[in-house]
Amino acid sequence: MATVTTLEGIEELRPQVRGGIITPEDAQYDEARKVYNGMIDKRPALVAQARDVGDVRAAIAFGRENNLDIAVRGAGHNGAGFGTVDDGLVIDLSPMRWVRVDPATKTAEVGGGCMLGDIDHAAHAFGLAMPVGVISTTGVGLLLGGGVGHLSRKLGLSIDNVLGADVVLADGSFVRASADENPDLFWAIRGGGGNFGVVTALTLQLHEQSTVVAGPIIWSLDEAADVLKWYREWLPAQPDEVGAWFAFVSVPPGPPFPEELHLQKVAALICTFAGDPADADEAFKPARAVGTPLLDGVQPLPLPMWNSAFDGVYPAGDQWYWRGDYFAEIQDAAIDVHVDFARRLPTWKSTMHLYPSDGAAGRVAPDATAWAYRDAKWTGVIAGVDPDPANAEAIKTWAIEYFDALHPYSMGGSYVNFMMDEGQERVQATYGPNYARLAEIKAKYDPDNVFHVNQNIRPA
C-alpha cells in the first residue's frame, strides 16, 4: 500500500493544491473518501480537493511521479465506485462548484464539481433548463456518459446539449474541447466521459422550460403486463413534449403517498409533459384509461422540484448494485421477465426503470457523439438498493439474475452510467462501432492510460 510517508514530494504538493490535501491521518479522511454507493469502501492514499485548474494539474503531476492510480470524483455517484481508488490518488472536484448563466445566449458555464441540482437552480431563475438525470445530487461529470431523464424526448440527451469542455490532459496541458477546438476530443468526451482527461468545466445549452406537468401514475402489479404492452405502443407515437418512463417500484412509506399504498410493489409511469400545460390532461388521458390506476399524481411542478423529487428516497450511503441495457423494443417474453422479477423486488428501494431515448435523442446520428445506440427506444436500468449492508448480497443477486434473464431481449450494449465493474467486453459493447475511434482518440490524448479508473477505453 502506498502511504503518505513513502510518497515523494507530498510536502511540496500541499501548497500547490489550494483546496487542500487529505490523508489517512486527517480527521476528515473517512468523510473525504466516501462515495454515493455505500457498497464501495476504498481507501485512497490521498485526496486532493481541487479548487481550480492549477490544483488539478499539480495533482496529476504528483500522481504520475509517484506511479499512483488516479481516480476523479465529482459528486461520487458512479455506481461502480470509480470516483475513488485503493492506495491511489483521488482528485476531488467538489470545490469547483459554480454556475454562471447567460440568459442572452441561453448558455451556462458550470464547474466540474457541480451537481445537477445546481444547474436546475441557476437556470430556473431565468426560466431556462437543461435536460439532466432524475437525481439532483448527481455530479455533472456523469452528464458526459450520456444523460437520460425527464426531458430526453424533447431536448435530447445531456451530451447533445454540451457545447464545450475545459479539460486537463494526462500531461498536465489544459485544452478546450468544442466543435471548433479539438473536435475529436469533443466528440469523444460526449459519451466517453472522463477517459481522456479531467473535465474542469462545461458549457451547456439551455432551453426555455420553467414548469412541467408531471408525476406518477401507478397500477397494481397484476396489471403490469397489460400496462407495459400498452405503453410500448403508445409512447413512441407521442410528440416529443410527452415523456414517460416505466418503472417497477415499491410505494415510498410516507407523504404524499396514501398510507394504504405504502410499500406496495407497483408498476408506474413517471410522466412529464413539457408542452403547453393546457394540453397535459389530453396528453395523459390514454394512460388514465388503462386498467385501474391506484394513484394519479400528475400535476404542475417547477422543473427543479421535479428533477429532485427522488432525492429523499435515494440519499448518499445506500448500498447499490446496477445493471443496464438498451432496448429497441419491449417484447412479450421480456415483459414476462419484468413482471416475474418485479414480484421479487428484494427491498423497497430496489427498482427497474425504462427511460425513453427516442424523440429528439433518437434523431442524432449514431456517430455524431460517442453514444452509439441512437436507435434504442429505451435505456433500461435494474438497481438493487438498500441502506443495510447486510442486504448487499441479496440486492446484487437479484439485479444480476434479472439482468441475465432480460439481456437476451436487449440490443447487447449497456449505458455507461448504469454499469458496475463488468469487464472490458462490456465496455466495448457499450460503445459498439464507435469504440475503435474512441481508442484512437484515447491514444492521442492519454497514450499511457493514466485515466484508467473508469469504464476504460484502452489506447489503440
Image: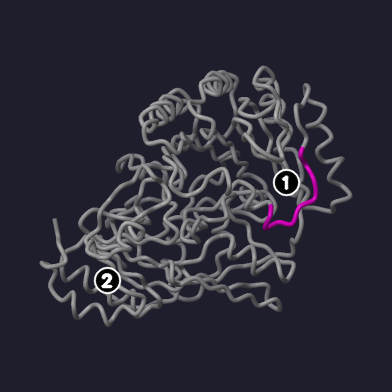
**Could you tell whether 393 is left or right of 355 in the image?**
left
State the residue at coordinates (41%, 42%). Answer: 419
State the residue at coordinates (31%, 69%). Answer: 48
The image shows residue 130, relative to residue 21, as above or below, that is: above
Q: Element at badge 1?
A: strand
Of all residues, the one furthest to the front in this rendering is 27
- The x and y percentages for residue 59 are 28, 72
- Quadrant of image for the C terminus: bottom left
> What residue would you read off at disc 2?
60
Q: CA distance from mark 2 to mark 1?
A: 42 Å
- The x and y percentages for residue 212 are 76, 53
- Residue type at the position of mark 2: Ile
The image shows residue 272, relative to residue 258, as above or below, that is: below
**Could you tell whether 285 is left or right of 54 in the image?**
right
> What residue would you read off at disc 1?
272
Is residue 296 or residue 334 the one in the foreground?
296
Counting the numbered discs, the total is: 2
- Residue type at the position of mark 1: Thr
410 falls in the magenta region: no
| Stretch of the chain drawn in magenta | 297-305
The image shows residue 20, relative to residue 45, as above or below, that is: below
Of all residues, the one furthest to the right in this rendering is 278
Is residue 454 or residue 175 the one in the foreground?
454
